[in-house]
Amino acid sequence: MKHVIKCRGISPGRATGEVLLCRQPIGFNFGFDCATGKVIEYNHELENISIKDKILVFPYGKGSTGGSYVIYQLAQMGTGPKAIINLVTETIITCGAIMGHLPVVDRLSEDPFSALRNGDIVTVDADSEQVIIEEASHDSAR
């Protein structure tokens, strides 16, 4: 059974993919290897993990405005996420996502860290302002 969560659309579009949760803010400027999509920020919870083709869920971005270009570059190289879900999306994430045609939503009607699990298959539909859990992962109970 699908579960629909309302949200606010930030950058238009729709994408379906596997959830990758991150409870830490992400700094895109100097935090990624754009050729692989791997996080290279030292001691980050996603260090050495690729965000390529994931639905990336994290609270908010951090760092300088150069992060917008890194998001755009990840999108252009095909090594970035399919979509982003934030608690609150700030300007750095918004600009990069719009340039890279990457759907972004925030302010979900349910806490994404409670409603979503790594491995869930979700559709992020920024146009209709909803996140749809298509298939729950089997690695943990809700």
Image: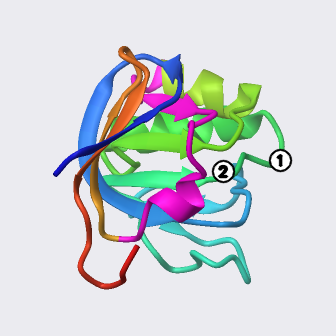
Q: Residue at x 52, y 43 (%)?
A: 85
Q: Would residue 114 be counted in the magenta stretch?
A: yes
Number of residues whose C-alpha sits closer than 10 Å to that of mark 2, classed few (under 14), some (14–19) or many (20 or more): many
Q: Residue at x 39, y 71 (%)?
A: 118
Residue 72: x and y in percent read: 50, 33
According to the image, label 2 marks what residue? Answer: 28
Residue 69 figure quarter: top right
Q: Is residue 105 above or below residue 127?
A: below
* Residue 102, disc: none
> Can residue 33 be seen here?
no
Q: Nearer the viewer, residue 38 or 18?
A: 18
Residue 41 figure quarter: bottom right
Tell whether 131 sits left or right of 122: right
Q: Amino acid at mark 1?
A: Gly
According to the image, label 1 marks what residue? Answer: 63
Tell whether 105 sits left or right of 29: left
- Comes first in the chain, label 2 or label 1: 2
> Can residue 48 be seen here?
yes
* In contact (CB < 8 Å): disc 2 and disc 1: yes
Residue 14: x and y in percent read: 29, 27
Its colouring scheme is rainbow
Tell whether 95 sits left or right of 64: left
Q: Residue at x 73, y 46 (%)?
A: 61
Label 2: state its secondary structure.
Answer: loop
Residue 70 figure quarter: top right
Q: Amino acid at mark 2?
A: Phe
Residue 120: x and y in percent read: 30, 63
Q: Main secondary structure of the magenta part?
A: loop
Query: Which stretch did the figure color magenta?
Result: 99-118
